[in-house]
Amino acid sequence: MKILVTGGCGFIGSHTVVELLNQNFEVVIVDNFYNSQKDVVDKIKEITKKDFKFYEDDCCDEAAMRKIFSENKIDAVIHFAGYKAVGESVAKPLMYYQNNLDSTLILAKVMKEFGCHKIVFSSSATVYGDPASLPIKEDFPLSTTNPYGTTKLFIERILKDLAYADKDLGVVLLRYFNPIGAHESGLIGENPNDIPNNLMPYIMKVAIKELPQVNVFGNDYDTKDGTGVRDYIHVVDLALGHIKAIEKIKDETGVLVYNLGTGKGTSVLELIETFAEVNHVDVPYQITERRPGDIAACYADATKAKEELGWEATKNLEDMCKDAYHFVKRVKNL
């Protein structure tokens, strides 16, 4: 199968491309490097010892997308491309709605035009809003607390409507929890172009003394230590979930939905302390005000993915912290 990976040089996209190539899929990447680095293309080749087609284009550019599909017989798409920061989405909602929805609408239009009927969508646990109970199952009510989450929910609805109208279409919605870690080679990992919005890259910048301390947004949540609790999952485990999703949807139509998480909640302070302990570094932090759009706790019930996809997370929090730090030390030549 030939798989188009949008946003394939980003954090999750690059790790998924590695796993696709390792399992002998043909891969085409499109990425505009809005929040990724150009050297990732060569690093993927170095890790896998395999070649692939790459296009530096924007998924919002319909002519560019049509060119990609006209030059390649695409069998399925894994759609990662999109803006992804909760805080930024609260400050710049229009930017998020325009980019994330336009890129998906154009992609879906061009897929239909070229007879491509399979898509795996990079969704998020944010579509569950502030859940009434935990752990979160796929049939929980959907709502959102920030524009980023709302774009994910809108796109899910768009893809569901398309699949209802087109009985040939097969869609997998993968609702991620909180991916961290990096490839064991240290060649690829999470390396945002600006001030990090996610916790782990922030911790890493503090650990290597690029930033003075981690800001912990609130310690008065109804959790074990008052800080936010999330389900952290190793990015390689997450990438392998996409392989399982592609294999599942290959011969199916309709819409399938899966949580990808470990099923274990970890607080902000627990993550900071684990990172400091396993990597033998200091990670100073300060408690600040809550961040708009954040919720107290969120962790998965990933039973459905285990039963239907044969997938489950295998790496633990210590693995995630070690691999993330190995990556950042290699990037910074430390």
Image: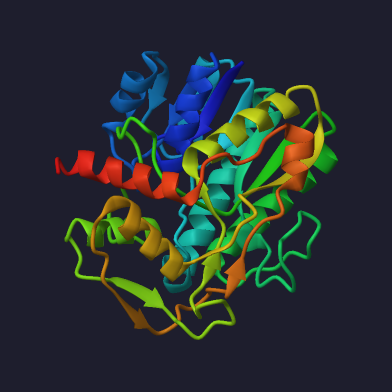
The location of residue 88, given as percent across then percent down, is 41, 67
Examine the rendered structure and indicate whether residue 258 appears above or below residue 201.
Answer: above
The quadrant the C terminus occupies is top left
Depth order, front residue of 27/294: 294
Examine the rendered structure and indicate whether residue 260 appears above or below residue 239.
Answer: below
Examine the rendered structure and indicate whether residue 215 appears above or below residue 82.
Answer: below
Q: Residue at x 55, y 49 (%)?
A: 102
Please indicate whether residue 301 sits to the left or right of residue 15 in the image: right
Q: Residue at x 36, y 83 (%)?
A: 288
Occupied quadrant, residue 23: top right
The location of residue 259, given as percent across then percent down, is 68, 49
The location of residue 98, given as percent across then percent down, is 51, 57
Residue 170 makes an appearance in the image: no
Looking at the rendered structure, the number of numbered marks drawn on it comes to 0
Residue 33 makes an appearance in the image: yes
Q: Residue at x 79, y 41 (%)?
A: 255
The quadrant the N terminus occupies is top right
Q: How is the image coloured?
A: rainbow
Occupied quadrant, residue 33: top left
The location of residue 230, given as percent across then percent down, is 55, 63
Q: Residue at x 65, y 52 (%)?
A: 155
- Extreme left residue here? 333
